[in-house]
Image: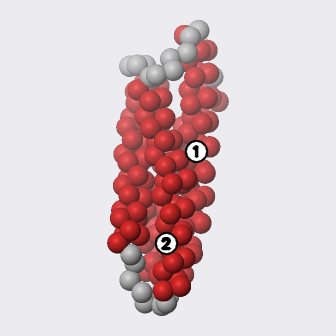
Amino acid sequence: MSWLRALMLLALIVWIGGIVFFAFVLAPTAFHVLPNTEAAANVVGPSLTALHWMGIVSGLVFLLCSLVCDFMRHSQVRLFSPAHVLILLMLGLTAISQFVITPHLRVLRTEMKTAGPGAPPSPEFNRLHQWSERTEGGVLLLGIVVVVLTARRFDGRN
């Protein structure tokens, strides 16, 4: 069972660590170091897609391992434990970002390219970009709560 716990923790580390790295290192560095916003967006956009897929796989691995651990420990599965609900919310936010927000942002970026260099982003682009940041921030905050709940669970308090 310890290998299942390790896999659960690894999945959580990959997901939360990826978000932290993306938000605080990759995106700011790309927009600071690269010569223009288009070049930075060409790095950040595909990186965000990779981050989303890492999150989806990590969330599913966490859930599966957690359910198996519960079954092995208690001979029953607790489908709606607080950590499971939060992971499902994180998966939902990640899916919304990946399959709803990001494709719209891609279309708007293409339209901005055709408008010519130096054209300001549309209000719609700015609005969707804010929603993208909010969903990633929400996933990060929920993930931190899952880390605390998981630590308590392994501590024997839950």
Residue at the image point whose x is 49% and y is 90% from the top:
116
Q: Amino acid at mark 2?
A: Leu
Q: Residue at x 38, y 58 (%)?
A: 131
Classed neighbour count for the residue bearing mark 1: other residues with Cα under 10 Å, few (<14), some (14–19), many (≥20): many
**Residue 127 visible here:** yes
Q: Residue at x 56, y 31 (%)?
A: 63
Query: Is mark 2 in CB contact (under 8 Å) with mark 1?
Result: no
| Residue shown at the point (61%, 15%) measured from the top left | 72
Quarter of the rendering containing residue 25: bottom left
Q: Residue under label 1, please give it.
A: 56
> Residue flagged by tag 1: what amino acid is it?
Ile
Query: Residue under circle 2?
Result: 108
Measure the C-alpha gap from mark 2 to mark 1: 25 Å
Residue 95 location (% of width, % of height)? 53, 47
Of residues 154 and 71, the one nearer the viewer is 71
Q: Which mark is residue 67?
A: none
Q: Is residue 2 left or right of residue 80?
A: right
Helix, strand or loop status at disc 2: helix
Judge depth for marks 2 and 1 and give the one in front: 2
Residue 70 position within the rendered picture, expressed as x and y whole percent measured from the top left: 55, 18
Label 1 secondary element:
helix
